Every structure is written in structure tokens, then in C-alpha cells.
Image (cartoon, helix red, strand yellow):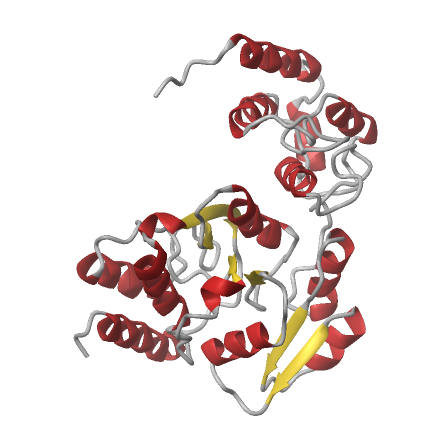
Amino acid sequence: MDFELNSDQIALADGIRRLCDGRFPLERLRIAEGSASAIDDRAWQELADAGVFSLRAVGDEGLGLGMAEAAVVFEELGRALVPGPLVASHVAATLGLVDGAATGKAVVGAARRPSTVKLDAVVPVLLDHFGALTELVVVDDGSTDETAKEAEAAGAAVLSLPGTTGKGKAMQEGLRATSGEVIVFCDADIYDFSARFVLGVLGPLLTAPGTALVKGAYRRPLDGQEGEGGRVTELVAKPVLRLLFPELPSLRQPLAGEIASWRHVLNVLEFESGYGVEIGMLIDIARLYGAASIVESDLGERRHRNRPLSELAPQAQTVIEVALRRAALL
């Protein structure tokens, strides 16, 4: 495979480099980090005018270029330390999800939300940024707080289930409550939730032919220590998959709750009722559509409620049981 840039790609890289040269010093990056208000509107508009966000979009606002050109551009943006939600805005423009994303009038994914799991901080970021979002359903699986009330107040449809039915059952009921062909699931215990969790898994599904399942991949710190989160994933799920299903792709987060898939794919699956739903879905889709149909999308860092070991043991056992059943060993 030839990885050498052609003359047009070289010219594109040079143009972006000249545009960014000296514009984004390190001090500006420190100021802008994590702050939507610190984005330089004039610089953002110049990036849009240069085609950064409309590179792969088609139609009147798009340039219709390919992934290789996008990689060239974003390499230069990274080299120049350009701040802001560049990838989220680019994907939103490419997929036509947000009016004004391609022209720089809308900055997608720059919203900063409080570090809580309150639904009034979670739901609006989806409603604000997705003009093409036809359905937003919050499944209330026997919560004892104000989940349903806050979700409804924020504008989401709420599906309340009697008692605690289990994660897999909640996901299946959520699927049945919707009608769209493209389905995205997100866990509800994520701190600092933003549109990147949806856009990140949605983009590959819609742009990579043959993709049946996209799973989120991320860093998972535990008590501030990098690489220590995801205990069930590291100690149970990954070893079991390597031993019983070596043909599956080596995924960073095989149990990720942030996923995107197609309705026709999900409709034929057997949803495990509890926490074994993710590993069961992974194995079943690989068998039906091939291991190559499963991809991961890097979502950055994921911080969420960390459970004590006493609560993780039943989850670990469920993951093992589902894997053994899929391998016909139980």
C-alpha cells in the first residue's frame, strides 16, 4: 500500500500549516482547554473557510474529499496545537447532523457540563447538538431518585420499567421503544457527558462500509490513577475472550456501554438480561457479520461511578457465564 502523499495532499498540508503558523501558542491552549467560551470565533471561522469542517461533506457546503485528506489536515492541526472540538465539529458537518457545523457557525461538542450524573446536565447536550436526532429515550430501570422527572423536564422520552430488570433487558426495551434504523446506546453514569460519546460511535458506523457494531474505547482512570479502571474488563472479559474467542478483534473496551449499530443487526440478537449483554452482543455480531464488522472509536477519557469489589463480583460472574454459554461450555 502506498502511503506517500500526492501533490494535492502535500499542497493541502502546506496550506493548513501556513494558516495555523504562529496562531495557537501553548498559552492559548492552556486557556482554551475545556472551555467553550475560550474558543477564538475569528480563528474558528477561518478554519471553516479553509474547509477544515467541510472536507468530507458533500453538497453545496462540502468539498467531498476523502479520509486521507482529513488525516492530513488533522495532523497539521494537531501539530499546531489548535484547540477546540475539531473532530466533533468535522464529523457533525460530514454527516449533516448540525446546521452550520460545516461553515463554522456552529461549534459542536464544546459544551461544558457539570461533573455530575444529573440528567438535566446530560440530556440537553444531545438535544442542542443533533438536528437529525429523531428519538431520545431514557430508560428508567427502577431508579429511586428523580431520573424520570428530570429526563422528562429536559425533553427526553422516558420509558419506566417496573422494578430492576437488568441492563440487557433495559437496552432491549429501549430498542423496542424506538423506530429509527441507526441506534446509539450510552450508559447513564458518565461524568462530564458530552456529544462526543454519541458522535464518536456514530461516525464510523455511517462512514465505514460493512460496519455492524461500533464500540467506544477510552481511558478509564480509577481514583485518579491512569490505567487502573475497568477491573472486570481487564481481569475477566479480555482473558475470557482471548481464550474462548481468539478470532475476535482485540478490543480495548469489549464491555463498553457506548455503542452504535443498526436496527436490523440488533433485532436478530439475543439480549442477555443483565450485565452480560455487551459480551454476548460482541460475540453474536462477530458470528453473524464477521469480526471485521466490529470497530472501536476512541472517545478520550471516560469517568464514571466506580463500584466496590463486592458489587463487581456478580458482574464478573455474569460475563463469564455468558461467554461460556456462547462457547457451548455451559
Measured as percent of width and height from the top left, residue 181 is found at: 59, 61
Q: How many marks?
A: 0
Choose top left, top right, bottom left or bottom right for residue 134: bottom right
Measured as percent of width and height from the top left, residue 215 is found at: 46, 55
Picture quarter with the N terminus? top left
Identified at 66% across, 52% down, the residue is 195
Of 139 and 34, nearer the camera is 139
Identified at 60% across, 61% down, the residue is 191
Q: Is residue 93 above or below residue 280?
A: above
| Residue 33 seen by the camera | yes
Is residue 118 rendered to the left or right of residue 42? left
Measured as percent of width and height from the top left, residue 139 is found at: 61, 77
| Residue 220 seen by the camera | no
Q: Is residue 53 above or below residue 135?
A: above
Is residue 93 rendered to the left or right of residue 316? right
Identified at 68% across, 33% down, the residue is 58
Choose top left, top right, bottom left or bottom right for residue 180: bottom right
Furthest residue to the bottom?
162
Of 63 and 198, nearer the camera is 63
Identified at 68% across, 36% down, the residue is 84
Q: Is residue 250 above or below residue 68?
A: below
Q: Is residue 225 above or below residue 52?
A: below
Picture quarter with the C terminus? bottom left
